[in-house]
Every structure is written in C-alpha cells, then in structure tokens.
Amino acid sequence: MKYGWHAAAFAVLLTIANVVFYVGSRGGASTGQPSVTRVAEPDEVIGQELMMALAQAKNFHHKAKVYMTDGNLAEATTAVRQILSLRFPPNTPEADDVRNDARALLAKLLISQNQLEEAMRTVDEGIAQSPRESFFVANLYTVQGEIHEARALALDTGGEQAKAAEERRSAITSYDKSIKINEVLQKKLMEGK
C-alpha cells in the first residue's frame, strides 16, 4: 500500500504557515509610505501552540511511515494513534484536518491488519466530529468505502453473498459522498479564482 499522498497532504497543511502578506512600513498606505512585502513567520500566522502540535504530528507521521516501510504495521498504528492524542488549540481547522488525515491513515492500517470494525469506528468518529467539509473529510468517506469493500470480500468468502452485496452498495454510497464533497470544494476553489 502506498501512503505517499498522506505525506503530501500533510505538507500542504504545514505550508499554510508560509503565507505571504503585506505589512505597511510606518503606517503603510494610510500614511502614504510604501508597503513592504515579507514572508510571515509561522508563529505569526497560526500561533506557536498550533505550530508545535503540527510539528509533533508531522514527526509521528514520519515515524509511522518508517514503520510502514519496514512492514511493522503494529508500531505504525501506535505512531498514528499518537497524532490523535496530541493537544491542539481549540477551534482550529488545521487540527481537524490533521486528525482526519490521521484517522484515515489509521483506518487503512487497521484494514491491512483485518481489524475492520475498529477501522470503521475510527472513520465514523472522524466524520461525526468534523465541523466542516474538507478534502480530509472526503477522504474519510473514501476510506469508509474501502472498509465496506473489505467487509464485502470477507462476507463473499464466508458464503454470505446477500450481505456482501449490501456492503458493496454501502461502499458506493460512501464513494459518492466523497465525490460530492470534493466537487463542492473544487467549485468553491474555481469560483475563488
């Protein structure tokens, strides 16, 4: 299984800290002085407490990736769970995104260890606790679909074709939900350009 997109998505999150903004020198435009463009320091943009939590999450994510590369899924699972135990400042969308990204990765790890019910609980918690729709919530629905597919395969193997068909329909519903969220987000992005 490839998990590279998780690292890319997480890197995008951390790039938020490198926002460029305009600061007026000695009062800026209101005093007739020229504006100076500078790159904001990360703690100016999102706060030191959040930056520390994001840095910790990044380290646990890298640690999990190393364990996955070595095939040590149990330790990778433990590292990802540590992301979920981090304290973030309240009401920060970045924290929601990091947690949902971690939940998606954790669920995939659990699927690979045939812990389907725990994987589903992990995804369902993330969806239930998400105050807004985002790429990361859409991804939770995608992983939910993968869990339904894994359940269907297990049911097919056990000779329960009717229940397996039900799980496949549920998988399609989950994928459709993910697609709809992403379409709405893409439309908003295009309208903003």
Image (cartoon, rainbow, N blue to C red):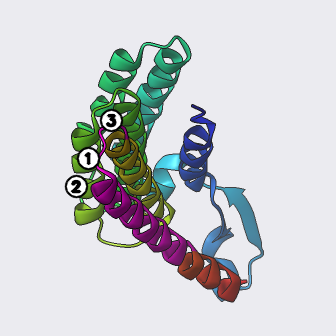
- Marks 2/3: CA distance? 15 Å
| Three-letter residue code for mark 2 | Glu
Q: Quadrant of residue 27?
A: bottom right
The stretch of residues the image draws in magenta is 157-182
Residue in the image at 53% along x and 48% along y: 42
- Marks 1/2: CA distance? 5 Å
Residue in the image at 36% along x and 73% along y: 132
- On the image, the x and y values in percent for residue 32 come to 73, 85
- On the image, the x and y values in percent for residue 73 come to 40, 19
| Residue occupied by mark 3 | 83
Residue in the image at 49% along x and 75% along y: 181
- Magenta span: chief secondary structure: helix
Of 115 and 155, nearer the camera is 155
- On the image, the x and y values in percent for residue 2 come to 60, 33
Q: Quadrant of residue 124?
A: bottom left
Query: Quadrant where the C terminus lies?
Result: bottom right
| Residue occupied by mark 1 | 122
